[in-house]
Amino acid sequence: MLSNASGEHSYAISGPGAGRAHSLVFTSLSKTYGGLRAVDDISLRIPGGEFLTLLGPSGSGKTTLLMMIAGFVQPTGGEIYVDDRRITDLPPEHRNFGMVFQGYALFPHMTVAENVTYPLRVRGISRAEAETKVRSALALVRLGGFEDRYPRQLSGGQQQRVAIARALVFNPDILLFDEPLGALDRQLRAEVQVELKALHRRLGTTFIYVTHDQEEALSMSDRVVIFNRGRIVQAGGPGELYERPKTRFVAEFLGTSNCIKGQLVEKAPDSCRIQIGQRQIVHAGRPSASTGEILLAIRPENLALSPTEPVGSPNRVQGKVLQAAYHGPTSQVLVETEIGPVTVMCLAQRTLAELAPEKPVWISWSPEASVLLSE
Amino acid sequence: MNTIAAKQYQQKTHPRMRFPTSAWLLVLPLILVLGVLYAGPIASVLWLSVTDPSPGLGNYERLLTSDALQRVLWSTFRISALTTLFATLLGYLIAYTMLHASARHRHWIMAFVLVPFWVSVLVRAFAWLTLLRTEGVLNTALVSSGIITTPLDLVRNEIGVLIGMVHYMIPYAVLPLYANMQGIDRRILNASRSLGASPWTTFIRVFLPLSAPGVAAAALLVFVLALGFLVTPAILGGGRVVMIAEYVRVQIMQTVRWGVGTMMASVLLITVVFLLAAMSRVVDIRKLFGAK
């Protein structure tokens, strides 16, 4: 939607290839507040042009990291570089990063046009040039014609567009987003996600995006960095993180996972057998340890639910339905099994009678569906 | 659009409250107290100003003819305006400092702002007299240290009145200013910095305009209160600086010209009412002072 509206004004804002996308590097970056380690020894390289999302629960340090990138928080240790330039001590106004704040942080006493002109004005850009840039930035976010409105006269979604236009009008080296969609309703959020992704493709600028919403992270990013307690837990592409989580935290934070503990009983070259209670199951993978406790994660959508025993399946357990929640296209069913409570996601065509509480059912999955977790 | 919708919603769901007749009985004692102690005396002041010594607008006519009255009005206005200027300016500095101080420092500053609040205005005026008079602490120190040879005239003139009044008014300026500044979203200031503005530009272009309602509230409050000052100008002005309240006191207590006295009191009252009415057209007064 963003791309088709910008039209002939797009020359004023850098498109793909116009200007170089800038990389960002942290080396052992830390921030401590009193004894609390908000960001704990983080090293990361963000290549130019990447859409990187910092994802984590609140208090995980992702916002503190973003504030250090923007220059509002001074790190207690480590360095930040843009390309090869050290910017650790540079004040925010000299970093040339665009930022979209949580709650938009528009200037309430300025009109839309004045808000978007502001970064150009403080840079001493001529009135004529600024006007052209502002017009194309507003066209880019489909807000042409709203120049003279005040922020309070706009809807949340429109305010958000103004904030984006203001952050990109001065061709920043890097664009930062601090939970920008938090205040929008679900439908609008999905719409803006698509637009942001399109904007990123169009500008080719490095985007760094902070959110606690895993769906947002998965749908937009080239790469997601998952934070917990000030540290990076796992980084990777959205598919990789979802399908191959390394820890229980990642498995449970990104979507839902059934985490099952068992004992390793037999190790083959490309699979292993695991004892869980009275059952033995097969996992298509090779744990590094040869014996001991094993932690497996299985996604609810990879579990099959059947009223009778699925004899052909290598992994099957018996149980009874505890409760079922209807979600439209799918239903989420909680089943009490011999290996503990398990959540199953199944297509909602199943009759409700089939999923009634106390109903005996069988659950099965393929050996490839389970993922070995390290902790 | 959201706020308009919200307002409409509010109006729809909260129509003007209807009081059942029995509810008025509950409010009646308060209305009586207010009537006897407040509305009654004000009405009688207004009444006296047009009836004593003879019915008509004779007392008000003096405003146009009497040089003495015009002098009193002018010095009242001038001193109040200067007090407003300095108190608001100092109050702004104090509130701004409090906003950026650590919690501990903020509490100390607030305490120092508020302590004079609880000291009698009389005590404060005499304290300033002790400090500022010719043989006072300040002049003695300055002369004996050789910085000046003749003592400065700091009291029994307008400077003395201004010093005393500004000091008295600072808490009234600080409180609305600080409340307003606290309400300014820090993210908006951060946004300005991230968009390339220096701290100074951010202050001038963003913070200052956003604190304007606080400045308006502080200035209005200080000005209205300053118009009616009695004790401070009487003591620190040493009889040479006569403001409206002192003039009214003299008319009623000494020369016993009730008509002129009540006329001046009415002028003060009407001025304040008009001032508030005029300001309320520009800003929401109830919101300004936190009643909403």
Image: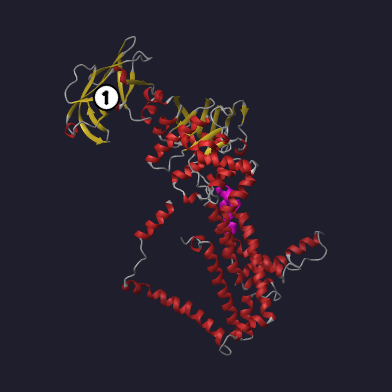
Name the quarter where the C terminus of chain A is drawn: top left
Residue that carries the numbered disc 1 in the rendered image: A303
The magenta-colored residue range is B96-113
The image quarter containing residue A320 is top left
| Identity of the residue furthest to the top in this view | A269
Residue B238 visible in the snapshot: yes
Name the residue nearer the viewer: B70 or A168.
Answer: A168
SS class, disc 1: loop
Q: Quadrant of residue A324?
A: top left
Where, by quadrant of the figure, is residue B279 drawn?
bottom right
Q: Is residue A26 above or below residue B274?
A: above
Q: Residue furthest bottom?
A: B54
Q: Determine if residue A61 is in view.
A: no
Identified at 19% across, 20% down, the residue is A310
Residue at figure coordinates x 80%, y 62% from the top left: B143
The quadrant in which the N terminus of chain A is found is top left
Magenta span: helix, strand or loop, mainly? helix
Front residue of B57 and A26 = B57
Q: Label 1: how many residues lie within 10 Å, few (<14), some (14-19) or many (20+)?
A: many
For disc 1, the chain is: A
Residue in the foreground of this view, choosing between B30 and A263: B30
- A215 is within the stretch colored magenta: no
Q: On screen, A114 above or below A371?
A: below
On screen, B258 above or below A242?
below
Q: Name the spot of residue A71 as percent of width and height, x first.
A: 58, 36
Q: Is residue B109 magenta?
A: yes
| Left or right: A299, with A221 as reference point | left
